[in-house]
Image (cartoon, helix red, strand yellow):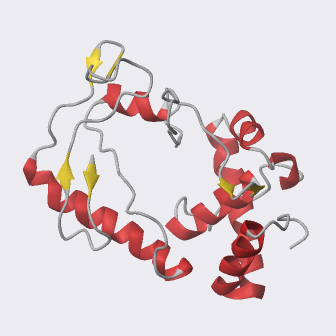
Amino acid sequence: MFTGPTALTSFAVKPLACPCGATNAPPSFNGTALVPAVAKNLWPGLVNGIQTILDLVRKVYGPSQAMQPEVPVCQSNACIDYFAGAQRRNTTLYPDSCAGQYVAPRIGNQHVPAWFDEGFATYLAGDPICTNVSGKGIDDLRRLDWETDWVAYTGPEDVLFKTCCQARAEVVGWIGKRCSAGVVQLLDAVRQGQSFWSV
């Protein structure tokens, strides 16, 4: 796991904390330890990749107002399964949670729809490539406001792909009218207590 200052001019590799096991035991998944050292020759590429991602985020949101994220790096299938599950879906681990659980993102006590969150992430990363996608993934994105609904509906890969591209198109259209600064204004308003939909 890499940690360091925003510029990533320095970092450290440390073993993962075990969310659901004994605090002094090295984390494992299906009997496979998840703490082998990452080969030093891979560090520069990993750090450059993380820096590229952070630069993309700053391009839209401006200077970071949060702590430098910790980034787990997997070299084994067991490690990937631990964090992303058998379907290799992105997940977020929160304190006292087990691998594969996803907790809805919150801004203060307010909720941002899952489809907007996923569509914006797809727009920001430029992945997947949606230029040749035809048709919608779902008739109404508002049916996927909650993360549990998003994950349940987008299980099949073709449905996930089309729905991500549909959500991205919605976000791109919105940004086209409001510019990137509008995203910051939207999230600030939600953070201050206004509902996403009212804004």
Find residue 193 and report its horizontal and vertical position in percent: 80, 66
Image position of 127 (left or right of 177): left
Looking at the image, which residue is at 50% across and 38% down?
93
Image position of 105 (left or right of 50): right
Dividing the picture into quarters, in which one does residue 30 lie?
top left
Find residue 44 and report its horizontal and vertical position in percent: 16, 62
Q: Is residue 198 visible?
A: yes
Find residue 137 and report its horizontal and vertical position in percent: 77, 50
The residue lying toward the viewer, choosing from 130 and 155, is 155
Dividing the picture into quarters, in which one does residue 190 lie?
bottom right
Find residue 3 and report its horizontal and vertical position in percent: 27, 55
Image position of 10 (left or right of 82): left
Q: Is residue 130 visible?
A: no
Looking at the image, which residue is at 26% across and 52% down?
2
Looking at the image, which residue is at 36% across and 27% down?
18
The residue lying toward the viewer, choosing from 26 and 89, is 26
Q: Is 67 above or below relative to 148? A: below
Image quarter where the C terminus lies is: bottom right
Q: Is 181 above or below relative to 157? A: below
Looking at the image, which residue is at 18% across and 53% down?
12
How many numbered markers are drawn?
0
The residue lying toward the viewer, choosing from 160 and 30, is 30
